[in-house]
Amino acid sequence: MNSSETIPTVRIGFSADFLNKGRLAFPDIGLSLLENHPGLEVEFIPEYKPVYSPDQLSGYDVVISLKPRVTAESLEGVTRLCAIGRCGVGYDNVDLRACTERDIAVYITPQGVVRPMAESIVVLLLAVSHRLAEKDRMVRAGKWVESTLHLGQEPRDRVIGTIGFGNIAREALRLLANFAPARMLAFDPFVQPETFAEHGVEAVSLDTVLSESDYVLVNCPLTPQTRQLIGARELALMKPEAYLINTARGPIIDEAALVSVLQAGRIAGAALDVFEKEPLPDDSPLLALDNVLLTSHSIGWTFELFRDMGRLDCEGALAVARGEAPANVVNPEVLTRPGFLRKLEACRNGGIR
């Protein structure tokens, strides 16, 4: 190679929302793993867009992404991109079919989210149980004595049910078992019966979770099958004293139907970290309700969450640079496509040696 030739590199881009005013928004996203590799070039995509445009993606071999959506239009003319690392466990904001057709692997970071999200479910459950937000508002309004008359409840001797029984749900129920609930129920048609038994959880139908639980936890992914899975009929099955806690995805619940139930006091309340539209619109009727606790799709955002997710994403990028498929690919059919294998080979030849 003569001095005029460019040393080939593997280019890794991070979505712009990892930055805040030009500086890292999170203390540790695993960048140290990418240092001191002469075959790598790392940068942050300059502009944040809710939906990627092709020019933002076309110059990279790997993109590590937080919030922006990847659509078929985002990938038009994008030929170099080999992998997208989603920072998180959900991937409903990525068009998997389009990625597969473009020979792009999409990988996620499930090990990084389990503990923080499970703890967040416990936090929300205890907060609504003890009417934390309501008491806080009353004390700030000078209603000290009145606040003492609003009794909470405990999960002890009550029924906790989850819709979805993946890793987050299992860890949440493991933690909640310390509060001595009477029963723990789960609905998940994709889990083997023996798995429920191993975790001390009863496998039941969706309707049973809704009708018998004092706390209904939503822990399933958003898919065409689960979109608006919980509508007016399902909400009508819930006990008047029950709480609904959703930390999964907003569109799993028919939000208008939930607002109606909450306004009528048909259930005790809800805790919502996710919504049909995000950010939550200023005119959302949820904002006017006292029996709902709202957080900004960030209840699980901790130092540890971003440290662990970032490292997993960066490890995936390093694997691609070595010419290897990253772990936790959610469109595994791409892994045998000739176009994807050619991209991996190109990364291996131009990346870490």
Image (cartoon, rainbow, N blue to C red):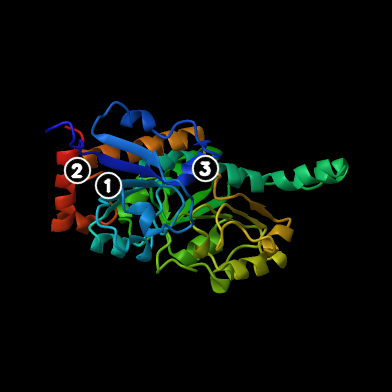
Disc 1 marks which residue? 61
Which image quarter: residue 318?
Answer: top left
Viewer-nearest of discs 3 and 2:
2
Q: Is residue 158 left or right of residue 61?
A: right
Between disc 2 and disc 1, whose residue precedes?
1
Q: Is residue 174 visible?
A: yes
- Disc 1 marks a residue whose amino acid type is Asp
- Is 93 situated above or below 108? below
Left or right side of 311 for 163: right
Label 3 residue SS: loop
Q: Amino acid at mark 2?
A: Cys
Q: Residue 222's spot in the image, x, y percent?
A: 43, 61
- Position above or below: 238 against 170: below
Q: Which residue is mark 2?
A: 347
**Relative depth, front residue between 23 and 246:** 23
Residue at (24, 64) in percent of width and height: 101
What kind of element bears circle 2? helix
Nearest the eye: 165 or 279: 279
Q: Which residue is mark 3?
A: 300
Task: Tell whether label 1 touches label 2 (CB within 8 Å).
Answer: yes
In the image shown, does 297 or 134 lie closer to the viewer? 297
Residue 350: x %, y % from top left: 18, 39
Q: Position of residue 243 (x, y in %)?
A: 61, 56
The residues bearing labels 2 and 1 have C-alpha atoms spaced at a distance of: 8 Å
